[in-house]
Image (cartoon, rainbow, N blue to C red):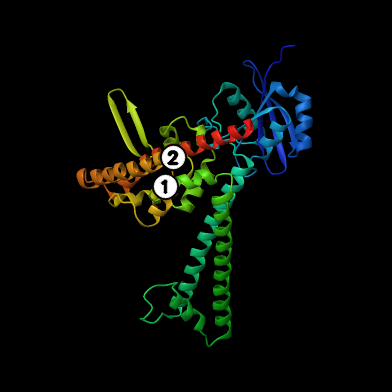
Amino acid sequence: MQYVTKFVGLDVSKEKISVAVADAGRELPRYFGTIAHTPAALRKLIKQLGPANSLAFCYEAGPTGYETHRWIESMGASCTVIAPSLIPKRSGDHVKTDRRDAEQLARLFRAGELTAVHVPSRDDESLRDLVRCREAAKEDTHRARQRLLKFLLRHQIHPPETIKRNWTKKHRYWLASLTFEHEAMQVVFTEMLHALEEIEHRMSRLDNALMQQATTGAKASVIQLLQSLRGVARLTAITIAAEIGTFARFRSPAQLMAYLGLVPREYSSGQSTRRGSMTKAGNSHLRRTLVESAWSYRHRPAVKGELAIRLEGLPADVQLISWKAQERLHMKYRRLVFGKSKPKNVAIGAVARELVGFIWAVARIAEQSEGFRSTNQQIR
């Protein structure tokens, strides 16, 4: 029996899913209806449309995550998660409903006009959630500190001249010694200080969890080798490993650069070619981290301090890549800033783009060696 593939578009929300089906060919998609957002409802839908191996589902990436994808895949059908920002839009189309969205997904999916996003494994997703939780805690720490300082500023309370910097031990002792005449103000200040301490304790717990993942987690080998690069310490290496998942899905460093939005915009027509600023498409968390790391390469190449400690015991080819990265990226920064008079932030953007190439090379070495070890264990 010959099966005809059906392309199923799903408009997924918190409690329900709107379903549209496009049969192979050129006919318009038909609206199937609305089902509950549960595994049982999806299993019943697959049985009604089936068989499972003849169905290809798709839905937009969103707040409901990847569980719907995993449910469908476990039931024998294929499912693709679509990048919402890359869905073609008709100009002048100002009507948006769940039904129309599902029909549009089914039609464009059949035509091959949709761009899929990478679905991480549960391990990769859990590590990424841990990294982003730590990032959110860091932002909360900054807000809590600013809220406390602005409260003191409103009441013209300033630290003594012997305290040169905020949030040092001396500054914290001074904060703990403050008292206020009015009881309400004392309550406000105490609660602000207590809230800051709670967030800092949360940061400490998250840092300990990240430390454990960096040493014993599934990505430990990749994280260790990534730290061979200047500007890529433990937290940055964990962020890179968590956000990328597996580097094998990128055929070349250029593909990874484009994924991170570090490549320049381009408009070419006829004999003219114009390039602009970075596209800033893709993963903003990782792009910001890499730009921060790129600032380390404005300094002269050197192996000392924490970098020398991180390089101890690493393979010779990884250490060679680390040194080549320092030489190449430092020269690029100097050539752009002092040779071509480019602004420093523009030069750092270019350095970050090339840094991605060295990260890709080191990570692929780690993944290939890990795959080699896994193969040997299976043979034994």
Q: How many marks?
A: 2
Crowding near the residue tagged with mark 2, few <14, some 14–19, many ≥20 C-alpha atoms within 10 Å: many
Please tell me which residue is depicted at 42% across the width and 47% down the height of the picture. Answer: 228
Frontmost residue, 67 versus 148: 67
Dot 2 falls on a residue whose secondary structure is helix
As drawn, the label of residue 313 is none
Q: Residue 275, percent across and down?
A: 32, 35
Residue type indicated by callout 2: Val
Distance from the alpha carbon under mark 2 to that under mark 1 = 9 Å
Q: In the shown orientation, is residue 57 left or right of residue 250?
A: right
Task: Provide the residue designation for mark 1.
Answer: 228
Q: Residue 31, percent across and down?
A: 70, 27
Q: Residue 266, percent across and down?
A: 35, 32
As drawn, the label of residue 362 is 2
Dot 1 falls on a residue whose secondary structure is loop
Frontmost residue, 318 versus 75: 318
Which quadrant of the figure contains the N terminus? top right
Q: Residue 296, percent across and down?
A: 34, 52
Q: Farthest left residue?
A: 339
Please tell me which residue is depicted at 78% across the width and 25% down the height of the picture. Answer: 48
Q: Is residue 51 above or below residue 40?
A: above
Residue type indicated by callout 1: Ser
**Is residue 232 in view from this perspective?**
no
**Is residue 159 in view from this perspective?**
yes
